[in-house]
Amino acid sequence: MTGYSNASAVVVGGSIGGLTTALLLRDLGFTVDVYERTPTALDGRGSGIVLQPDTVRWFTERSTQNLADLHTATSYIQYLQRDGGIAHRERAAWTYTSWGTFYRALLADFGTEHYHYGEYASGFGQDGERATVRFVSGATATADLVVFADGITSTARERFDPEATLKYSGYIGWRGTVPWSTLSAYARETLDDAITYGVVPNSHITMYPIPGEDGLDVGHRLMNYVWYRNVEAGPDLTEMLIDKRGFHGAVSVHPGQVQDRYVCEMRSAATELFAPAVAEVVVATETPYLQVLSDVRSRRMAQGRVALIGDAACASRPHAAAGTAKAAADAWALAAALDDAAGDIPSALTTWEPAQLQLSDSLLRRVVDMGERSQFHNTWVPGDPDLRFGLYGPGR
């Protein structure tokens, strides 16, 4: 790890991918500053994350924190029929965390001295020696290396690939969490120690336990779910994405902001379609929210001294539970390329790019196929090994 003791890096985007990148660059010797667009700490996000090896690698190899303190686990995958019977069940161990739990752990390792809130990047420029990020506040940040990890709505992506625009999948995801302790004894018994699926024509739901904001124990644990439902592009979708304040959500409608009539319809449909335990979780969700499921992939991830990683480079439907793992994989591969290049940043980025582009392409193709099978072709078969989670392939 030589050649970067006098080098600086700017990471745009302070979420999980950005923090992983920042930590790895700092370990290489870079002085790293992270710029996050939101004005306050990214806290209280209850969405679940299925943990994969690349996601947790920082904690297994570099951190002093105990990974066991950050996740829940289940031993089985099960598919439930409408009447509550088991359509398929097999032993398969998975671990999970919540977005907030994992974010706070990474931020604790990075610290807040070089973590800047409320700076929205609007563009960048570079010459042969340095790259400069421009922010809407009028501020700029110049460094030897710039990494954009600013998510699906990345402001930098168009400068890498003008044709890389979001393509709507044809369906949305209803998301939510419910305290495990508030569920009925029947629901807890039915859903315990398993990731649970419900498959119905042109739709499916998956749910699993995640840490609560206050801890891992049963008293704080949450049941997290994603329910995929078809909504045709056009005026119906546009109307559905207008929140209670009258704002239009291009990629999501936040908890507490989804119009009540859509929430009521969602709860009613869950009761009709799913097993009683699954429906109970959906109906009990106080503030469900919507995610617009779209795909995008840039044909470039490296440009001189500037890199594009994670969802900023390739965002895809979550059927493989690999979005966070892909961002981490991009970061680890970038750090390895920089280490091998011994100070030549543009050369490192050029070496790093092809394999990450290939990984993005293979992941996107696979999740699109999984989504088409579920939502339009009705060929999502319980227990099919091709439908397993994994960044590099089913179960991998």
Image: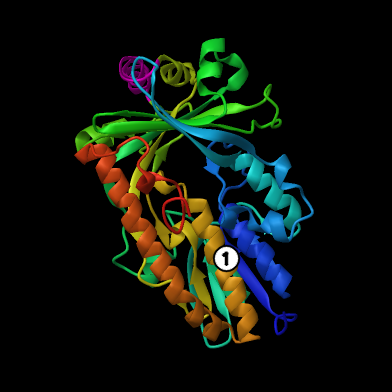
Compared with 330, 48 (above or below) is above
Q: Is residue 274 magenta?
A: yes
The percent coordinates of residue 176 (x first, y second) are 48, 29
The percent coordinates of residue 290 (x first, y second) are 40, 34
Q: Quadrant of residue 361?
A: bottom left
Residue placed at 59% from the left, 15% from the top?
182
Q: Residues within 10 Å of mark 1 (few under 14, many from 20)?
A: many
Q: How many marks?
A: 1
Compared with 94, 123 (above or below) is below
Point out the image quarter for the N terminus. bottom right
Residue placed at 30% from the left, 51% from the top?
368
User: Pointer 1: what residue?
Assistant: 331
Residue placed at 57% from the left, 65% from the top?
331
Of residues 383 and 9, the one drawn nearer to the viewer in this rendering: 383
| Segment colored magenta | 259-275
Q: Is residue 80 visible?
A: yes
Residue placed at 38% from the left, 52% from the top?
316
Judged left or right of residue 288, residue 112 is right
Compared with 318, 285 (above or below) is above
Of residues 36 and 188, the one drawn nearer to the viewer in this rendering: 188
Q: Residue furthest right?
A: 64
Judged left or right of residue 47, residue 366 is left
The percent coordinates of residue 93 (x first, y second) are 56, 40
- Magenta segment main secondary structure: helix
Judged left or right of residue 318, residue 91 is right
Q: Quadrant of residue 238?
A: top left
Q: What's the image's color scheme? A: rainbow
Kind of residue indicated by mark 1: Ala
Q: Is residue 250 visible?
A: no
